[in-house]
Amino acid sequence: MLSRFSKDRQIILSTHSPYFVDLRALANGGHLARITTTETEGTQIYQLSASSKTSISRLSDGNLYNPHVFGLDARELFFQEDCVILTEGQEDVLLYPRVAEQLGVPIAGTFFGWGAGGAGNVAHLCLILKDLGFKKVAALLDGDQAAEASKLAHNFPEFFFDCIPAKDIRTKPAREGTEEVVGLLDEKLILKTEFAGPMTKLLAALSTHMTS
């Protein structure tokens, strides 16, 4: 109904519900603004740029392999206070907390949705978060994405980027025509001892970024 009425009138909607974040409306000329109030900065209004709208369209339209990148859970992003952690995929969202639990190291921050749908999508999400005024953003990438992490750090120096000390979050056995991928966690989803030290340092650095 709101979309239909917006064809010939201006509608301003103030909401805390992800159900009212209409990505199609953004693609068709709508605007999205995030309002924050803090003791140090007072009330601030942040609005998506045209580039961010393009990024949202790329992440949400025709994404057959990752249709959940901007699903309902992901749209909760627009209402978070701050301290957002981006990951490549949905396994990461589920398994990084398990790694932290095994290490006895808390993670400061909230994971975004069900992952970015690949390392190449993280930059789109960083642009959106920057436009909307998020200050504490981190991304954890697989160990074979050092070049991507370096590029992200160059483009978004205010955010935190790092790679885990393994090619993937979990070990994946070789398949026909596919080599074995060595991950942080073994086949029983237990953190490998050789990665305990590096991961403890990585999570500590992430928490320092989020809380400092």
Image (cartoon, grey):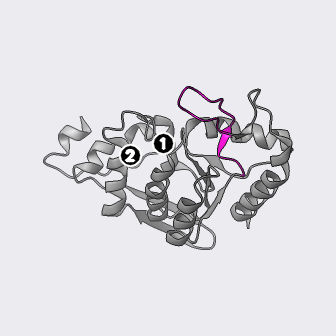
Circle 2 sits on which residue? Answer: 59
The local secondary structure at tag 1 comes to loop
Tell me the residue at 80%/58% (across/down): 201
Q: Amino acid at mark 1?
A: Gly
Q: Main secondary structure of the magenta part?
A: loop
Residue at x 41% of width, y 36% of height:
19
Residue at the spot 70% in from the left edge and 47% down from the top edge = 166
Q: Is residue 61 above or below residue 202?
A: above
- State the count of labels: 2
User: Residue 107 in the image: x percent, y percent?
Assistant: 74, 49
Q: Which mark is residue 46?
A: none
Residue type marked 2 = Leu
Q: Is residue 132 magenta?
A: no
Q: Position of residue 130 (x, y in %)?
A: 48, 64
Nearest to N terminus: mark 1 or mark 2: 2
The numbered mark at residue 117 is 1
Does 194 sit left or right of 167 as displayed?
Answer: right
Percent coordinates x, y for residue 146 in the rendering: 60, 59
Residue 105 in view of the camera: no
* Callout 1 touching callout 2 (CB < 8 Å): yes
Q: Which residues are magenta?
A: 165-181
Q: Is residue 109 left or right of residue 191?
A: left
188 in relation to 183, above or below = above
